[in-house]
Amino acid sequence: MFSRLTLMVVGMLAISSAVFPQVLRPTETFRLMVDLARFRGADDSHANLELYYGFPRNGITYSADTAGFAGAADITLLLKQGDSTVYADRWLVPHLLRDTSASSMGMSLIGNYPFNLPPGEYQLKLIARDRNDSKRLDTLQLRVPVRLFPTDRLALSDVEFASSIRQGVKGGTFYKNTLDVIPNVGGLFTESQTCFYYAEAYNLLLTEDRSDYTVRLNVYDAVGKEIMSRERTRKRVGESTVLVDQFPAAKLRTGTYTLVISLLDSARKTMGSAAKKFFVLNRELGIDSTLLSASTGVPLAVYMSMDESELDREFLWARWETLDAEKEQFASLKGVEAKRKFLSDYWRRRGPGFRDEYLSRVAYANANFTMMSRQGYRTDRGRVRIVYGSPDDIERHPNEGDSKPYEIWSYHNIQGGVIFVFVLRNEGGDYELVHSTHRNELHDENWDRVGVTR
């Protein structure tokens, strides 16, 4: 009896392990993103330096926990001047998934690390490791020059890009000057996002001039063409002030842009300005065709070891991101060097980190949706996964009486919430997209009657 009971317990544990996984493997590359912004310090001999860091939460490994699945990034920070380490720290960025469905939500874990530093030349090194898989790590090293802000003229801080800015609660991680400023680490915005920025202006009352001043916003594209301009008048009500504004990314094509903030006095003379680059990925408007001819001529290091067939394969993988003009341009190229340069500029136009993100989605699609001779990136589910990322929820219906198997994928943050419906029409075949509420996708309100009934 004891032996039989033991076997039953072992069997139940085996079934439990199979049904409830003990480890959730990452679906994205473990990569560290950082950004910096410099503000005036508490005294004239120091400056406040804010380090913003982030990484995709789907890039870490989760292990089963009593409350769900626990994962974390282990971060080590070293700040040096010359050969001397002036500051060091190490901390964990934990994250808990209450259930496995939550793991599909493609959000980033972000943080803010402030410094109060005297002027000088610093070197910052960050090492981030997956707590549950130490072999998965990323390292970044940055040169950090720290300068004091002038006290004899108007000055502007660095610009911080943010994913949102709202009234905050004092003591919060991202709280400053009554606001919660949630950093957009890397400054990459999609067409569904709003570009927020935060900056500070100092020494507004140095002179006797108390007249109103103007805050001017300009956005320039990669070739210096002005894309956006607007002005707002403000009163001089204090020695310093916070500059906050926003504009929609939906109006900008895919590419690299520069935001310039300028303060003008009543005579329209520029008193001070600050600038920062940002990046837009807009799949609806695509890329400005005038930028296709702009080439750096310097291939990315990753392409130097690739032969022509590997370059061609990568361009095929990028099919869901590629414009017709780019397809025509690539088809006209001759030789491996030309293709290396083309692909280097192709990904540079889409902003830092985009290539890794896109190819990690392709890898996931190929690993999970490949059917016979058709690779996963060419399937309907693979395409949707690559273009729109991980769905927030997947509703699976594998076998329901007289209905064919089907899946409903939900994305909560696209166009106010959209769904994609896939049906397995033929046994041994693949799931086909039959309906979506996304305005640029196949739409069929009768999908449940036409596409699902056996």
Image (cartoon, rainbow, N blue to C red):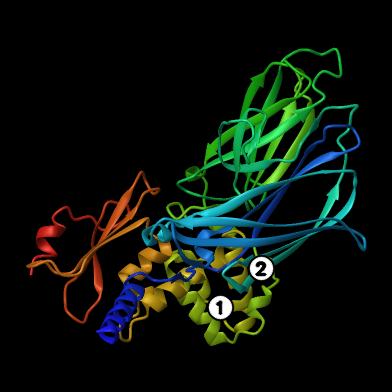
Answer with mark 1 or mark 2, whichever residue precedes in sequence: 2
Foreground label between 1 and 2: 2
> Which element carries disc 1, helix, strand or loop?
loop
Q: Position of residue 353 (x, y in %)?
A: 59, 63
- Which is more toward the observer, 1 or 279? 1
Residue 309: x and y in percent read 52, 86
Helix, strand or loop under label 2:
strand
Looking at the rendered image, the quarter that the N terminus falls into is: bottom left
Q: Residue at position x 41%, y 78% from top? A: 367
Write the residue at 72% across / 42% down.
275
Q: Where does the image place residue 449, in percent across and percent down from the top left?
A: 9, 59
Say whether residue 199 is left or right of residue 430.
Answer: right
Residue under label 1: 333
**Spot occupied by residue 151 in the image (x, y as percentages of width and height):** 89, 28
Residue 349 visible in the snapshot: yes
Q: According to the image, label 2 marks what residue?
A: 138
Q: In the image, what residue type sits under mark 1?
A: Leu
Mark 1 closeness class: few <14, some 14–19, many ≥20 residues within 10 Å: few
Q: Is residue 90 left or right of residue 155?
A: left
**Amino acid type, residue under disc 2 in the picture:** Asp
Which of these two is toward me, 346 or 240? 240
Q: How many marks?
A: 2
Is residue 278 visible in the rendered image? The answer is no
Quadrant in the rendering for residue 344: bottom right
